Image: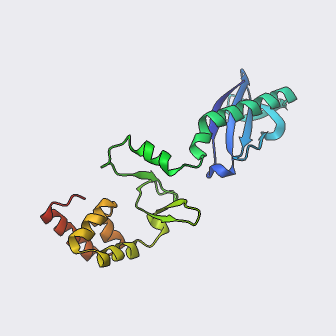
Amino acid sequence: MKIIETWNYGDAEEGIYFKLKLKENEYLDVKRFEDGYAYVLYDAVYRIDENKEEDLFRNCTQEEYDLALKLVDEYYDNNLKRRTRKMKVKELIKQLKEFNPEARVFADSYEGKGVDEILCSFSFVDNGDVILEHADQFDMKCEIGQMLDDYLEEDAYREMCDRGYTPDVVSKYYDEYTGECMKKYCDEHGIEY
Protein backbone atom coordinates (compact mmCIF):
# COMPACT_ATOMS: atom_id res chain seq x y z
CA MET A 1 0.00 0.00 0.00
CA LYS A 2 1.32 3.47 -0.87
CA ILE A 3 0.12 7.06 -1.15
CA ILE A 4 -0.09 8.13 -4.78
CA GLU A 5 -1.88 11.48 -4.58
CA THR A 6 -2.91 14.23 -2.12
CA TRP A 7 -5.33 17.11 -2.62
CA ASN A 8 -7.67 19.43 -0.81
CA TYR A 9 -10.74 21.40 -1.79
CA GLY A 10 -10.13 24.94 -0.63
CA ASP A 11 -8.84 25.47 2.89
CA ALA A 12 -6.53 22.79 4.32
CA GLU A 13 -8.32 23.18 7.67
CA GLU A 14 -11.29 21.45 6.01
CA GLY A 15 -9.18 18.35 5.52
CA ILE A 16 -6.64 16.91 3.12
CA TYR A 17 -7.44 13.91 0.95
CA PHE A 18 -5.03 11.08 0.24
CA LYS A 19 -5.39 8.43 -2.47
CA LEU A 20 -3.69 5.15 -1.61
CA LYS A 21 -3.05 2.28 -3.98
CA LEU A 22 -3.40 -1.14 -2.36
CA LYS A 23 -2.52 -3.22 -5.40
CA GLU A 24 -3.30 -3.23 -9.12
CA ASN A 25 -6.57 -1.31 -9.61
CA GLU A 26 -7.52 -1.25 -5.91
CA TYR A 27 -7.59 2.11 -4.15
CA LEU A 28 -8.91 3.79 -1.07
CA ASP A 29 -9.15 7.44 -0.05
CA VAL A 30 -8.40 8.90 3.37
CA LYS A 31 -9.45 12.30 4.65
CA ARG A 32 -7.22 13.79 7.37
CA PHE A 33 -7.67 16.95 9.43
CA GLU A 34 -5.04 19.16 11.09
CA ASP A 35 -6.02 17.90 14.53
CA GLY A 36 -5.01 14.36 13.50
CA TYR A 37 -8.49 12.92 13.00
CA ALA A 38 -8.61 10.78 9.85
CA TYR A 39 -10.87 8.18 8.28
CA VAL A 40 -11.18 6.03 5.15
CA LEU A 41 -13.92 7.40 2.90
CA TYR A 42 -16.92 5.07 2.74
CA ASP A 43 -14.82 2.44 4.59
CA ALA A 44 -14.37 1.02 1.11
CA VAL A 45 -11.85 -0.09 -1.48
CA TYR A 46 -12.70 0.90 -5.04
CA ARG A 47 -11.61 0.14 -8.57
CA ILE A 48 -11.40 2.46 -11.56
CA ASP A 49 -13.03 1.18 -14.74
CA GLU A 50 -11.99 1.81 -18.36
CA ASN A 51 -14.07 5.04 -18.37
CA LYS A 52 -12.11 6.33 -15.36
CA GLU A 53 -15.19 5.91 -13.16
CA GLU A 54 -14.72 4.81 -9.56
CA ASP A 55 -16.63 1.71 -8.60
CA LEU A 56 -16.92 0.60 -4.97
CA PHE A 57 -15.44 -2.87 -4.88
CA ARG A 58 -15.48 -4.12 -1.30
CA ASN A 59 -15.32 -3.08 2.33
CA CYS A 60 -11.94 -2.12 3.66
CA THR A 61 -10.47 -4.59 6.17
CA GLN A 62 -9.44 -3.37 9.62
CA GLU A 63 -5.81 -4.13 8.78
CA GLU A 64 -6.02 -2.02 5.58
CA TYR A 65 -7.81 0.75 7.48
CA ASP A 66 -5.14 0.88 10.21
CA LEU A 67 -2.25 0.76 7.73
CA ALA A 68 -3.79 3.51 5.59
CA LEU A 69 -4.17 5.85 8.59
CA LYS A 70 -0.62 5.08 9.73
CA LEU A 71 0.80 5.89 6.26
CA VAL A 72 -1.24 9.10 6.06
CA ASP A 73 -0.06 10.24 9.52
CA GLU A 74 3.57 9.57 8.62
CA TYR A 75 3.24 11.38 5.30
CA TYR A 76 1.50 14.32 6.96
CA ASP A 77 4.12 14.62 9.71
CA ASN A 78 7.04 14.41 7.26
CA ASN A 79 5.70 16.51 4.39
CA LEU A 80 2.73 18.68 5.32
CA LYS A 81 3.07 19.51 8.99
CA ARG A 82 6.06 21.77 8.36
CA ARG A 83 3.90 23.98 6.16
CA THR A 84 1.33 24.52 8.88
CA ARG A 85 3.46 24.87 12.01
CA LYS A 86 3.60 28.17 13.83
CA MET A 87 6.67 30.14 12.87
CA LYS A 88 8.76 32.19 15.26
CA VAL A 89 10.37 35.51 14.26
CA LYS A 90 13.90 34.08 14.70
CA GLU A 91 13.10 31.26 12.25
CA LEU A 92 11.66 33.69 9.72
CA ILE A 93 14.74 35.92 10.01
CA LYS A 94 17.05 32.90 9.60
CA GLN A 95 15.23 31.74 6.47
CA LEU A 96 15.02 35.19 4.91
CA LYS A 97 18.79 35.75 5.34
CA GLU A 98 19.33 33.21 2.57
CA PHE A 99 17.62 35.46 0.02
CA ASN A 100 18.63 38.60 -1.80
CA PRO A 101 17.63 41.47 0.53
CA GLU A 102 16.45 43.46 -2.51
CA ALA A 103 14.07 40.71 -3.68
CA ARG A 104 10.35 41.48 -3.59
CA VAL A 105 8.05 39.27 -1.53
CA PHE A 106 5.06 37.53 -3.11
CA ALA A 107 2.39 35.20 -1.82
CA ASP A 108 -0.72 33.48 -3.05
CA SER A 109 -3.54 35.90 -2.52
CA TYR A 110 -6.12 34.70 -0.05
CA GLU A 111 -8.75 36.20 -2.35
CA GLY A 112 -7.88 33.75 -5.10
CA LYS A 113 -6.66 36.47 -7.46
CA GLY A 114 -3.41 34.65 -8.16
CA VAL A 115 -0.02 35.80 -6.95
CA ASP A 116 0.15 39.22 -5.30
CA GLU A 117 3.09 41.18 -4.00
CA ILE A 118 2.95 41.42 -0.22
CA LEU A 119 2.60 44.92 1.16
CA CYS A 120 2.38 44.68 4.87
CA SER A 121 2.36 46.30 8.22
CA PHE A 122 3.44 44.83 11.53
CA SER A 123 1.48 45.04 14.72
CA PHE A 124 2.06 43.52 18.11
CA VAL A 125 -0.26 41.93 20.61
CA ASP A 126 0.01 41.88 24.41
CA ASN A 127 1.80 38.54 24.54
CA GLY A 128 4.55 39.85 22.22
CA ASP A 129 3.45 37.99 19.08
CA VAL A 130 3.87 39.75 15.73
CA ILE A 131 0.99 40.05 13.30
CA LEU A 132 1.91 40.51 9.65
CA GLU A 133 -1.00 42.21 7.94
CA HIS A 134 -1.57 42.07 4.18
CA ALA A 135 -2.36 45.36 2.44
CA ASP A 136 -6.00 44.35 2.12
CA GLN A 137 -6.24 43.92 5.91
CA PHE A 138 -5.27 47.44 6.96
CA ASP A 139 -5.87 51.00 5.79
CA MET A 140 -3.08 51.62 3.26
CA LYS A 141 -4.30 55.16 2.56
CA CYS A 142 -4.00 56.00 6.24
CA GLU A 143 -0.59 54.30 6.49
CA ILE A 144 0.83 56.26 3.53
CA GLY A 145 -0.78 59.49 4.73
CA GLN A 146 0.80 59.03 8.16
CA MET A 147 4.27 58.67 6.60
CA LEU A 148 3.73 61.79 4.50
CA ASP A 149 2.70 63.69 7.65
CA ASP A 150 5.52 62.35 9.85
CA TYR A 151 8.51 62.76 7.53
CA LEU A 152 10.04 65.39 5.30
CA GLU A 153 9.34 64.70 1.62
CA GLU A 154 12.60 62.83 0.83
CA ASP A 155 12.49 60.84 4.08
CA ALA A 156 8.86 59.91 3.47
CA TYR A 157 9.62 58.64 -0.03
CA ARG A 158 12.68 56.69 1.16
CA GLU A 159 10.66 55.14 3.99
CA MET A 160 7.86 54.19 1.60
CA CYS A 161 10.31 52.65 -0.88
CA ASP A 162 11.98 50.71 1.94
CA ARG A 163 8.58 49.26 2.86
CA GLY A 164 7.81 48.37 -0.76
CA TYR A 165 5.40 51.24 -1.31
CA THR A 166 6.45 52.18 -4.85
CA PRO A 167 4.97 55.13 -6.74
CA ASP A 168 2.53 52.67 -8.37
CA VAL A 169 1.43 51.46 -4.92
CA VAL A 170 0.99 55.04 -3.71
CA SER A 171 -1.08 55.83 -6.83
CA LYS A 172 -3.24 52.76 -6.27
CA TYR A 173 -3.81 53.06 -2.51
CA TYR A 174 -3.43 56.81 -1.83
CA ASP A 175 -3.91 58.95 -4.94
CA GLU A 176 -2.45 59.24 -8.43
CA TYR A 177 -1.14 62.79 -7.98
CA THR A 178 0.96 61.84 -4.94
CA GLY A 179 2.19 58.72 -6.75
CA GLU A 180 3.30 60.82 -9.74
CA CYS A 181 5.02 63.36 -7.44
CA MET A 182 6.81 60.53 -5.63
CA LYS A 183 7.94 58.99 -8.94
CA LYS A 184 9.26 62.30 -10.21
CA TYR A 185 11.05 63.07 -6.92
CA CYS A 186 12.60 59.58 -6.70
CA ASP A 187 13.78 59.71 -10.32
CA GLU A 188 15.30 63.18 -9.87
CA HIS A 189 17.05 62.27 -6.59
CA GLY A 190 18.19 58.74 -7.40
CA ILE A 191 15.90 57.00 -4.92
CA GLU A 192 15.35 53.41 -6.06
CA TYR A 193 11.85 51.97 -5.95
- Foreground pick, 143 / 128: 128
Q: Give the left or right position of residue 62, taking residue 75 as reference.
A: right
**Quadrant location, the N terminus:** top right
Image height of 35 relative to 61, above or below:
below
Numbered disc total:
0
What is the x, y in percent for residue 61?
Answer: 86, 28
Image height of 103 relative to 62, above or below:
below
- Foreground pick, 68 / 160: 160
What is the x, y in percent for residue 84?
Answer: 60, 46
> For residue 145, what is the image quadrant?
bottom left
Q: Give the left or right position of residue 132, taking residue 17 as reference.
A: left
What is the x, y in percent for residue 109?
Answer: 48, 56
Residue at x-position 42% and y-position 56%: 116
Residue at x-position 79% and y-position 40%: 39
Residue at x-position 68% and y-position 51%: 14
Q: Give the left or right position of residue 146, taking residue 139 as reference.
A: left
What is the x, y in percent for residue 133?
Answer: 48, 63
> For residue 144, what is the image quadrant?
bottom left
Image height of 23 relative to 27, above or below:
above
- Residue lying at the far front of the rendered structure: 127
- Residue lying at the far left of the rendered structure: 188
**Quadrant location, the C terminus:** bottom left
- Residue lying at the far bottom of the rendered structure: 149
> For residue 142, what is the image quadrant?
bottom left
Q: Give the left or right position of residue 56, taking residue 141 as reference.
A: right
- Foreground pick, 92 / 15: 92
Colour mode? rainbow
Residue at x-position 77% and y-position 44%: 37
